[in-house]
Amino acid sequence: MKVIIVEDEISAANNMIALLQEIDSAISVQAIIQSVEKAVEWIKNNPSPELAFFDIQLTDSLSFDIFENIAVNFPVVFTTAFDSYTLKAFKVNSIDYLLKPINKDELISAINKHKNLVVKVTIQNINSDFRQAYKKTLLVKKYDGLIPVAVNDFAYFVIENGVVKGFGFKKERYAFDETLDKLEKQLSPSDFFRANRQFIVSRKAIEEAQNYHNRRFILKINPSPSELVVISKTKVSILKDWLRQ
């Protein structure tokens, strides 16, 4: 496996190399890169690696800026001493997010995720026709009739006073006769997440996932609902995996 390491601390880069060699001697480190500028230049002028390890805080900027300057068409594992960039990492080509000092077992898990990528992509391609069966438009009640609204225009769905309502990104509000469970089956699971019994949330509406009491998360979404969108501790790992997709 050919990899690159984007890391401005030589000791951290050397430690990563040593761990990778312990895990799999067939792993070949193609380059150690210390800045955003040099990373962009390297990616432009070299064949893509199979996997990359990006430290987040580099000498000249955050490694997220690499994605702003060039298309990154290979999977990335972020490494950092801070956990405040988790959601942002999930929104780019990240397959994992490792906190320093790097734990060997967690690194093995990240590499195994990469090895499973090809299988997952193949399954996704096979199921592409099935995914197209999900609704692109929903019929909603308005006055005495029904009107069609594009699914992508909804930020979230919520049960309010026993009635399922959909809220648009411009704060439009629509009522549904269906239950939230039935509505969930009509929505693509790659675009919408069942946060709890009360909420289904669009990926596009999520701005941040914040730590909450008792190892739970709360989702900060835009537009903001009147109630907290709480993710139970048993669903936190499911949410993380979904955000990585």
Image (cartoon, helix red, strand yellow):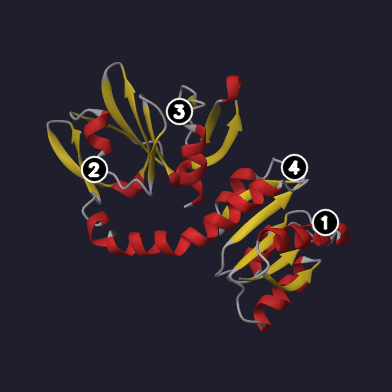
In the figure, residue 165 lies in which quadrant? top left
Q: Residues within 10 Å of mark 4 (few under 14, many from 20)?
A: few
Label 4 or label 1, whichever comes before in sequence order:
1
Q: CA distance from mark 1 to mark 2?
A: 47 Å
Dot 3 amino acid type: Pro
On-image quarter of the N terminus:
bottom right
Dot 1 amino acid type: Ala
Q: CA distance from mark 1 to mark 3?
A: 42 Å
Q: Are marks 1 and 2 in contact (CB under 8 Å)?
A: no
Per the image, the residue denoted by label 4 is: 82
Drawn side of residue 148 relative to residue 161, left or right: left
Label 3 or label 2, whichever comes before in sequence order:
2
Label 4 or label 2, whichever comes before in sequence order:
4
Q: Does 24 appear above or below 204?
A: below
Per the image, the residue denoted by label 2 is: 186
Dot 4 amino acid type: Phe
SS for tag 1? helix
- At which x and y percent is residue 72? 59, 69
Per the image, the residue denoted by label 1 is: 12
- At which x and y percent is residue 118? 44, 65
